[in-house]
Amino acid sequence: MVRLPFLSSTQGVPEAAAVPRHIAIIMDGNGRWARKRLMPRVAGHAKGVDSLREVIRSCLDRGVEYLTVFAFSSENWRRPKDEVSFLMQLFVKSLKAEIERIHRNEIRLRVVGDLTPFDDGLVSLIRDGEALTADNGKMNLTICANYGGRWDIMQAVEKMIAASGEAVSRPYSEEDLAPHLALSFSPEPDLFIRTGGEQRISNFMLWQLAYSELYFTDKLWPEFGEAALDEAISSYQGRERRFGRTSEQVVSDKPDTASDHA
Ligand code: IPE
Ligand code: IPE
Ligand code: MG
């Protein structure tokens, strides 16, 4: 069985560091940002790329190890054709423009989701970017594109069953499934951020958000940047992550600084 290098929040109590090890973001509110300025919705998507660049930089500076962003959901195909096609073109354009900078900053890029409906040009750009940055170790940037939490669980179940033999058999456990999830290379998010004011998950990382701290802000994605990220991180730092235990247990589990120095 493939063992994962980190603890699942339901199988044990993961360490909760002061700086979130993994931040996951639903970048929402681009359309409303543009409409408020009497611009077409897609102008908000273009501006959103600047926010993403700033957030990547800020996460890198703060020592965040994994940054995962929701760029296009499996339900976003329901949007007007022109908007979908603009988003695809923007993805191509931004990948081309940013990949060198990503690589220079020693960031490893991954794109996660069902890439089968994407055109060949985009898929090869994605695969080239992933290959170029595969050995980078400063930060893991994951873009979720045509991604859905339910899609992920279903494709993982399919793979788990296909791989099942002597080592993996029924009843299946979480540990049998986890290595097949699209984000199996990363620990679960410590901090989940959604911009744009909506308080919902919209089919993002359903499995992995089990014990993440949820943070919602009314700020629209094109207005989100370093200062807003710091506000989210400081909200996170004020939370008590109990993972099912009592508050008293959490407090007594903390390293005793007095005896540490003895
Ligand atoms: C998020 O912004 C970007 C994508 C879903 C691609 P929206 O386009 O959803 O913006 P609003 O929510 O309509 O303002
Ligand atoms: C979620 O935003 C998906 C992305 C940000 C890519 P949506 O704007 O699609 O979510 P809903 O439709 O408001 O739930
Ligand atoms: Mg939206």
Image (tube, rainbow, N blue to C red):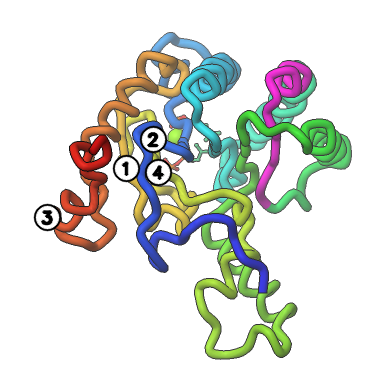
Which residue bears the numbered disc 4?
190
Q: Is the residue under label 1 in contact with that under label 2 (CB below 8 Å)?
A: yes
Instruction: Give whichever of discs 4 and 3 has the lower sequence position.
Output: 4
Q: Position of residue 233 (x, y in %)?
A: 34, 28
Mark-to-mark CA distance, 4 and 2: 14 Å
Residue 184 is one of the magenta-drawn residues: no
Query: Of the residues tagged 4 and 2, which is closer to the observer?
Result: 4
For the residue pair 175 and 121, the one nearer the viewer reads as 175
Which residue bears the numbered disc 2?
194
Query: Of the residues tagged 2 and 1, which is closer to the observer?
Result: 1
Question: Does residue 47 show up?
Answer: no
For the residue pair 121 and 228, the one nearer the viewer reads as 228
Disc 3 is placed on an element classified as helix
In which of the image's four quarters is ligand 3 placed? Answer: top left
For the residue pair 117 and 226, the one nearer the viewer reads as 226
Mark-to-mark CA distance, 2 and 1: 8 Å
Indicate the amino acid at tag 3. Glu
Q: Which mark is residue 248?
A: 3
Disc 1 is placed on an element classified as strand
- Which quarter of the figure is the C terminus placed in? top left
